[in-house]
Amino acid sequence: MDKRSLKRKWQGMRVRRHVGGAVDRIDGKSKACKNDGRALAARGLKGYTGPVALYVTEALGHPPGHGLRFFSLLAHRRMVGIVAALALLVVAPSRPAFAGGSAPPAPTFAIRGLDGRTVKLSDFKGKVVVLDFWATWCGPCRASLPHLNEVQGRFAGQGLVVVGISVDDTEPQVVRHFVDRLGLKFRMAMADERVLDLYGPIRTIPTTFFINRRGEVVRRVVGYIDSETLESYVRELF
């Protein structure tokens, strides 16, 4: 699936009601839901246009590996208050990127950076790497990006590299303007079909991968990550 089709899918899909009882069965995650919802609301959802994702795990009876994430709604600018309330229902589980045994090696890639230079995973050998797939139109992404900026500044001296990979179907200069406006200092690049395939399927953004110094993907997080949680995940890798 190309980026344009993927974006249309993200922006056009509504609740998949055929997932029997999924909404009712996430009550056990209520604390996590409320924490995520409060954090998103605290950031302010003005201009929110991205999807609030509903996540269904194997523990809820969904077949393993059968596409665990379904999109629950999209918000119009006039629906900010409704979205803030519905954000309390979001479950953004963190899970290891492997089922058991050892962590898999991170797929290598070479993509175009916003500065025009090539960004290659191999350039960061021996470093801790955080890869964040995001888009300018995604509300939770906009809330997460400042946290990524903070940890990059805090842990850069210890060997942390944060790389934002934009899935926007637009010209790089549009994304660059957005990044400059937010004052983001970490590396930014544009996704291509190959990197989406290598790290996919990426059905929800933000999706964040944590890679240790050995080049292994040790954690994948789907959805918004608050500042405290993000820092704890990064510290685990040092």
Image: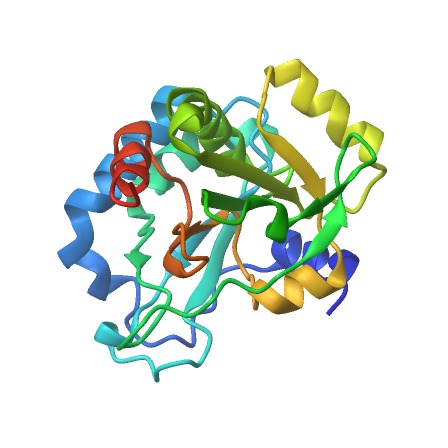
Of 224 and 123, nearer the camera is: 123
Residue lying at the far bottom of the rendered structure: 63
**Residue at 35% over, 68% down:** 103
Of 46 and 235, nearer the camera is: 235
Residue 226, x across and y down, in percent: 33, 33
Q: Which quadrant does the N terminus fall into?
A: bottom right
Of 128 and 95, nearer the camera is: 128
- The quadrant in which residue 22 appears is bottom left
Q: Which quadrant does the C terminus fall into?
A: top left
Residue 196, x across and y down, in percent: 65, 62
- The quadrant in which residue 177 appears is top right
Q: Is residue 108 left or right of residue 82?
A: right
Count the marks: 0
**Residue at 41% over, 21% down:** 43
Residue 126, x across and y down, in percent: 46, 47
**Residue at 58% over, 21% down:** 184
Residue 138, x across and y down, in percent: 58, 39
Q: Say if 142 sits above or below 210 in the image.
A: above
**Residue at 44% over, 36% down:** 83
Q: Is residue 137 left or right of residue 61?
A: right
